[in-house]
Image: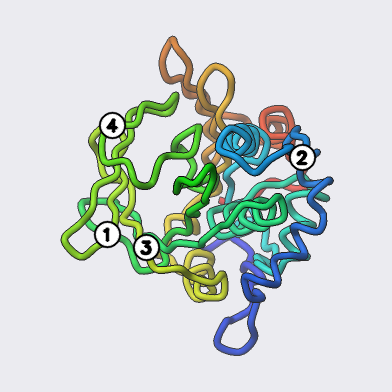
Amino acid sequence: MTGRSRTAITDPMTESVIGTAGDLAGVGARSAEYLARIGAVRPAAADAAALRELHERHLRSVPFENLSIHLGEEVSLRPEALAAKLIDARRGGFCYELNGAFAALLRELGYPVTLLAARVFGGGRLGPPFDHLALRVEAGGEPWLADVGFGKHSTYPLRLDERGDQRDPGGVFRIEETSEGDLDVYLDGAPQYRLETRPRELADFEMACWWQCTSPKSHFTKSPVCSMPTAEGRVTLSGRTLITADASGRHEMELAEDAVLGEYRDNFGIVLDRIPAM
């Protein structure tokens, strides 16, 4: 971590950085501004069709990014901090921030939402517990998996009780039960994460959030990344490499240092006063 300013995240062993899931009502209280942030209007009913639209609009408006870690900024899951970052600063975040805030918005709109913990597959093994936060959302009398905080994932919510293939613009998804009662989520045949079904509170993810932001073993501390789907495919800025994917394939371009801030602004709507440290 040489050459990078230390991330100002509070040590969870001495001071809590997040409130309880109930406290997230503070984010939902700004629902009109939140909806405007993602270019949506308040749905007439908390149904599956509205959930589908909200999910897609969130993905296309709020980028998946870990820039705070590389800017030396505080990473906080307090409701007022989530609102300030996503709504006021028009930034993005990673799973605890994005799905935590989205859960608050959905609850305020009338959806029953349950926070679920997951372990991400990588390198042929599972990551640590609470590696990821995803959402179970009830809509139209059916359970849905909503996830706007995983980076490359489904454009629309997935039926949580469906065990067959689910085709989505993001690929072909499948959810399979494990012998222990968990749920494995697959994309194009490759396992993405293992989802627990036990309800969680946002406070349960506090230690994992701290670890993701500080551990040299966390992939978030290795390099800044910012990614968002587009109408044509996806755009990602990983370190100084701009990656675009569309119907013609995948394209990479190494950026000069003086071009980085402009790409954050033009591709993700993120205005920074300095370049995130590598």
Q: Amino acid at mark 3?
A: Thr
Residue found at x 65% / y 51%: 106
Residue 23 x %, y %: 70, 72
Q: Dot 3 lies on which element?
A: loop
> Which quarter of the picture shows residue 183?
bottom left
Q: What separation in Å lies between label 3 and label 2 (alpha carbons)? A: 29 Å
Residue found at x 63% / y 72%: 9
Identify the mark nearer the N-term, 2 or 1.
2
Q: Is residue 254 above or below residue 89?
A: above
Disc 2: which residue: 42
Q: Dot 4 lies on which element?
A: loop
Residue 18 disc label: none
Q: Dot 2 lies on which element?
A: loop
Q: Amino acid at mark 1?
A: Leu
Identify the mark nearer the N-term, 4 or 2.
2
Q: What separation in Å lies between label 3 and label 1 (alpha carbons)? A: 17 Å
| In the image: residue 172, left or right of residue 48 | left
Disc 1: which residue: 126
Badge 3: few (under 14), some or many (20 or more) residues near its Cα, within 10 Å?
some
Residue 165 disc label: 4
Q: What separation in Å lies between label 4 and label 2 (alpha carbons)? A: 31 Å
> Which quarter of the picture shows residue 162?
top left
Identify the mark nearer the N-term, 1 or 4.
1
Identify the mark nearer the N-term, 3 or 1.
1
Q: Amino acid at mark 4?
A: Asp
Residue 261 x %, y %: 72, 37
Residue found at x 34% / y 31%: 166
Q: Is residue 93 above or below residue 205?
A: above
